[in-house]
Image (cartoon, coloured by chain):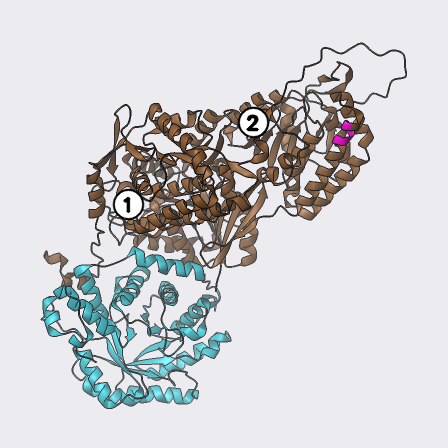
Amino acid sequence: MDWVDDIRINLSAAERRVSSLSGRRTVKNDAQAAWLLKAVACIDLTTLSGDDTAGRVKRLCAKARAPVRADILDALGFADRIVHTGAVCVYHRFVATAVEALEGSGIPVAAVSTGFPAGLVPHDLKLREIDASVRDGASEIDVVITREHVLKRDWQALYREVKEFRAACGEAHLKTILATGDLKTLRNVAKASMVCMMAGADFIKTSTGKEGVNATLPVTLVMLRMIRAYQERTGYKVGFKPAGGISTAKDVLNYQFLMKEELGRDWLEPDLLRIGASSLLADIERQLEHHVTGRYSAFNRHPVG
Amino acid sequence: MKPDMSVAHYYETMDYGPAPEADGEVRAWLKKHGAVFGHFIGGEFVAPKNGKHLTTIEPANGNTLARIAQGSAADVEAAVAAARKAQPLWAGLGGHGRARHIYALARMLQRHSRLFAVLEAIDNGKPLRETRDLDVPLAARHFLHHAGWAQLQERELADHVPLGVVGQIIPWNFPLLMLAWKIAPALAMGNTVVLKPAEFTSLTALLFAELSAQAGLPPGVLNIVTGDGTTGASLVDHPGVDKIAFTGSTEVGRLIRQATAGSGKSLTLELGGKSPFIVFDDADIDGAIEGVVDAIWFNQGQVCCAGSRLLVQEGIAETFRKRLIRRMETLRVGSPLDKAIDMGAVVAPVQLERIKSLVETGVKEGAEKYQAAAALPQQGCFYPPTLLWNVQPSSTVAIEEIFGPVLVAMTFRTPDEAVMLANNTRYGLAASVWSETIGLALDIAPKLLAGVVWINATNLFDAGVGFGGYRESGFGREGGREGIYEYLKPKAWSQRKLGPESPVPSGPTAGSGFEIPPIDRTAKLYIGGKQARPDGNYARAVLSPKGKHLGEVGEGNRKDIRNAVAAARAAEAWPKSTAHNRAQILYYLAENLSTRRDELGTRIAAMTGLPNARAKAEVDASVERLFSYGAWADKYEGAVHTPPLRGVALAMHEPIGVVGVACPDEAPLLAFISLVAPLIAVGNRVVVVPSERHPLAATDFYQVLETSDVPAGVVNIVTGSRNGLVRVLAEHDDVDALWVFGSKEASAAAERLSVGNLKRTLVDHGLAPDWNDRAACEGPILLRHAVQVKNIWIPYGD
């Protein structure tokens, strides 16, 4: 428990770090295009709406297979390379649909689970939901934690919960969603991050996208530092997934800079970085077209997902 | 396109790649001037009278950037004359008129912000990120803030007037920002300015002057004379300058103190530092490591308040070391105009050599050296971020200011030890304290001898928060209300005249016959709460104006001063006592003095020849003055500043420490009380040399001290030759401040000899005030000099 109890976070210092970083790092021209293309490869292309249908999910999967227009890839010198998103992320109901739609692409399907987004369904149902998604072919499970455990500092309960999620996932990757907007303080975020990693999370993820505040850079900074501290102690590399609110190319670059600075080059690849986003891709496509043509682009020039 | 610059290449490496800022506008500005600049005097560029120029280089590549004028005494003369001519008109504009002008300067800086930022980065070598995100916005903020002081001057500062013509000398590390810190308050208060920028970095000052004129600043209000140290010396020596404000090295600060001693020039010095950066074991370690980056790898470490001495608590030292070394690996050093770097170029080759040599010394003296593997540009003045671990306090690099990107580190065990190590330096500019325990952090901050303390932060600055040092880091404050007074003088002092030297009576007359004499009273020195015989065992006679022998006092010597200073230093409970407690004692002093009214009145009358009634009135005035400082003791409070961040800065009024006081001959009791009471009211301990001619009122007074619960060592009295004792006090390095009244010669000596530890001096240059005039001699007018302002920055949030 020392690993959790010893954690100290200073909000002002964290904010200062992230606000200064955007002035310290930037990428231009070809480097910028490369970084944005890398971001595409890390996107968990997501649809999590009450009105989702199989048709909608198939359209999303098609976009995941071909996220950037071929002529743009060609101009970037990527004609002979396959670029696809990191995963497609859906509710359990559409896991099978997505698995079928993505067959042969190598793109994994991620399922949000455990009573997403509030996570207040009975615990045994959560375990059954994970199990069902894994059986339908999801290779990544995005679970939500019980925020009450964090708010009441019941780290043992949080640890047990995540450990059981971990067991239920089997071979599938476990991403734990902290719902940082509900946890409020950076200290809570940091401690919850550490407990989830100790319980076996492969990724820690900021948000469901449904909280009042979703991914932010200060929250990201703190979670990354916890990943680093966990790696220092155990040697394990845990991945990170910011989700919600990252909608522009400029935004995503700032997340990438923070990953590289705080964790290193390895954390810029989809095995350790995923970006939960729905509208981000469209903005990146416009930026890439601008890079290629020198002309500002428009949304309607890029196929929707 | 080169193959290694392709999208595919970056996709594999995820390197940042070059991100250069365009510099076309700046190059065009230089070209417009033919890359040759004169001085800016009387609203226009003028060629140097002797035709000499200096070359200024671009530190990032060593190329010649421009030629700037080498100012001579004649150029300084012309600039001071222009400033003198403009000053009454500028002051006469009134606060609102000046506020409009200074507001216009703030807006001008904002409009041309990128031009200034790029020029500064090129000329100085510092990263564009810093000039763009810090230097230029902060400079604009200074003008905006001080436009406000001009606007409020007539209401808030009505009892003060401008000094006149101000000479300002600024360093190369923050050329534009230091210009703003200097000229904004000076101009706001109605002074005119002659500013000498550093020879390495004069260009932004020249651009500023040019654009100020365009923005309507009247000619002569701001004059820029460029050149090297000799130009600065001409400015310092110029008799037409009323004040010198200097930011730079402690070494040059001392020379300026000596050069201006006795001249009547007002002086503020903002000098070097070796500021501690203290990390407790309950700190946010990663946050503190970013703090280190901002502390010592900001502006290549060329920051006077850089947190250059890391003190880390033993329990986390190893973790801290490892994480810090890891962090150093991600620092990027490169072209100042690259927008993806952390550090640019050191300002000049001479500076680079100094850094290299000091680091070598540190390693020889036992430090473990870590340097980031960051690739340095092949050409230009670059030095990598460097950590010297396991440095002992006795090592050269722990003592000397390196002024480069070199952090020295040592460990401590307890909070007390942290404070002891932090204060184990001649300097006292800034300090940083990292702990998540509010009780600990707020306990440590007041114990640090530094003008600025940042809690869980570092290198925060704002125009509304005073900045300046304790000890040999200089004196005076820049920013906020506390900084404004540095450019003003009290109206009540402008009427002072050189006191007439009253004729010294000739030798004592013969005894008075065969009456029964009064019982002999031997006046002794008063040291450490005890009456003490003078070390030399000599006595000096005290005579009435007609030469009557009134008694004898001890002839104090250097050893008596030494003992008195030691006693004062030992009375360390006094500054920690509550203001309430000090108030009570001052009232008690008044009470006990009033019971001796007749005795002291008779004594004053006998010594000075005043009529009895006036002598008793002096005792009454002294009683009232003690009451007044009893009242002030718990009311002369600091302020809570509200800089633009989530948090506050507490401007604390802290006592200076051990203060020497030399009293004038006039009003022997009232002047003594008027000088001692404000000092002890706010927690100083004093060593007082009473009036040389009329010392018996002071020696009588020690009986009042003894009966009034004044702790031993708080007030020490050494009688004797004033000028001789002032010299000893001025040269004593454990005396923190020195007040000298009643002598032009002693005033000059006090200023000149105070350079050893750069004492704060308050002297009257022999210009006697009327001690009965409360406006001139009572309250904040003196209390301001009895305290130093420490600003404790407390960002908060959870």
In this rendering, position of residue B395 left or right of residue A271: right
Q: Would you say residue A294 sits in the magenta stretch?
A: no
Dominant secondary-structure state across the stretch colored magenta:
helix
Q: Would you say residue B616 sits in the magenta stretch?
A: yes
Of residues A240 and B753, the one nearer the viewer is B753
Q: Are marks 2 and 1 on the same chain?
A: yes
Chain A in the picture: what colour? cyan
Q: Which one is closest to the eye, mark 2 or mark 1?
A: 1
Chain where mark 2 sits? B
Q: Secondary structure at mark 2?
A: helix
For label 2, the crowd category at 10 Å Cα-Cα, with few meaning under 14, some 14 to 19 and many 20 or more, is many
Quadrant of the frame with the C terminus of chain A: bottom left
Question: Mark 2 or 1 closer to N-term?
Answer: 1
Chain B in the picture: what colour? brown
Identify the residue at image location x=65%, y=37%.
Answer: B778
Number of the label disc, if any, that sits on residue B121: 1
Residue B629 percent coordinates (x, y):
68, 41
Of residues B310 and B258, the one nearer the viewer is B258
Give the quadrant of residue B572.
top right
For label 1, the crowd category at 10 Å Cα-Cα, with few meaning under 14, some 14 to 19 and many 20 or more, is many
Q: Which residues are magenta?
A: B614-618
Disc 2 marks which residue?
A: B730
Whether residue B415 is visible, yes or no, is no
Residue A134 percent coordinates (x, y):
29, 86
Q: Real-space Cα distance between discs 2 and 1?
A: 43 Å
Q: Is residue A13 above or below residue A184?
A: above
In this rendering, position of residue A185 left or right of residue B496: left
Residue B41 percent coordinates (x, y):
33, 32
* Callout 2–callout 1 Cβ contact below 8 Å: no
In this rendering, position of residue B632 left or right of residue B399: right
Q: Is residue B135 above or below residue B264?
A: below
